[in-house]
Image (spheres, rainbow, N blue to C red):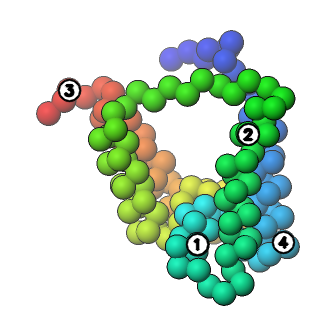
């Protein structure tokens, strides 16, 4: 295993991580809400009166950020090495996992770990291990 030093971008990754942390901290400090994307989106599917505005604004911000970035820099090329069926199955499995795990990577991995939540640590370790196992199985084991 080796690092592709030409693609290694620690400063932009550090800045991106800091921006995610600041956004999550601002949401919990100013709104009392955890920045878990699956929960924010799920709350829009069954809206509660007076609760949909901040959820829609948060999700629109997620979609608008790359467009704003594209005004100043070139977006990286998108390359997906999977077919439509695999993407559909993966999306359904991730959605099912977020329901069983009561949250997603942003809710547990970013916000829960920052609050030193034991439940979030277990959830994050579980979905990281599942991801590693899936990539290993799909890339290194013979098809069955």
- Residue drawn where x is 70% and y is 56% of the image: 60
Left or right of residue 75: residue 21: right
Classify residue 7 as left or right of residue 87: right
**Crowding at label 2, few (<14), some or many (≥20) Cα neighbours within 10 Å?**
few
Q: Which x, y percent locates residue 108?
A: 59, 62
The crowding category of the residue bearing disc 4, from other C-alpha atoms within 10 Å (few below 14, some 14 to 19, many at least 20), is few
Which residue corresponds to mark 3? 142
Instruction: State the CA–CA distance, disc 2 to disc 4.
Output: 27 Å
Q: In the drawing, what numbered circle is on residue 29? A: 4
Number of the front mark, 2 or 4: 2
Along the horizontal axis of the image, is 26 left or right of 111?
Answer: right
The mark lying in front, picked from 1 and 3, is 1
Disc 3 is placed on an element classified as: loop
Q: Which mark is residue 67?
A: 2
Q: Is residue 98 left or right of residue 37?
A: left
On residue 44, the disc is 1
Q: Position of residue 117 (x, y in %)?
A: 63, 69
**Residue positioned most to the bottom:** 49
Classify 10 Å Cα crowding around label 1: few (below 14), some (14-19), many (20 and above): some
């Amino acid at each position: 295993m080796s690092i592709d030093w030409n693609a290694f971008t620690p400063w932009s990754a550090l800045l991106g991580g800091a921006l995610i942390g600041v956004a999550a901290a601002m949401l919990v400090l100013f709104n009392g809400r955890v920045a878990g994307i699956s929960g924010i989106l799920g709350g829009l599917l069954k809206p509660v009166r007076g609760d949909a505005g901040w959820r829609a604004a948060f999700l629109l911000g997620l979609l608008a950020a790359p467009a704003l970035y594209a005004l100043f820099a070139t977006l990286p090329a998108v390359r997906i090495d999977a077919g439509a069926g695999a993407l559909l199955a993966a999306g359904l499995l991730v959605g099912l996992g977020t329901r069983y795990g009561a949250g997603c990577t942003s809710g547990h991995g970013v916000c829960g770990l920052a609050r030193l939540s034991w439940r979030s640590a277990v959830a994050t370790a579980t979905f990281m291990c599942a991801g590693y196992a899936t990539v290993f199985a799909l890339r290194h084991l013979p098809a069955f």
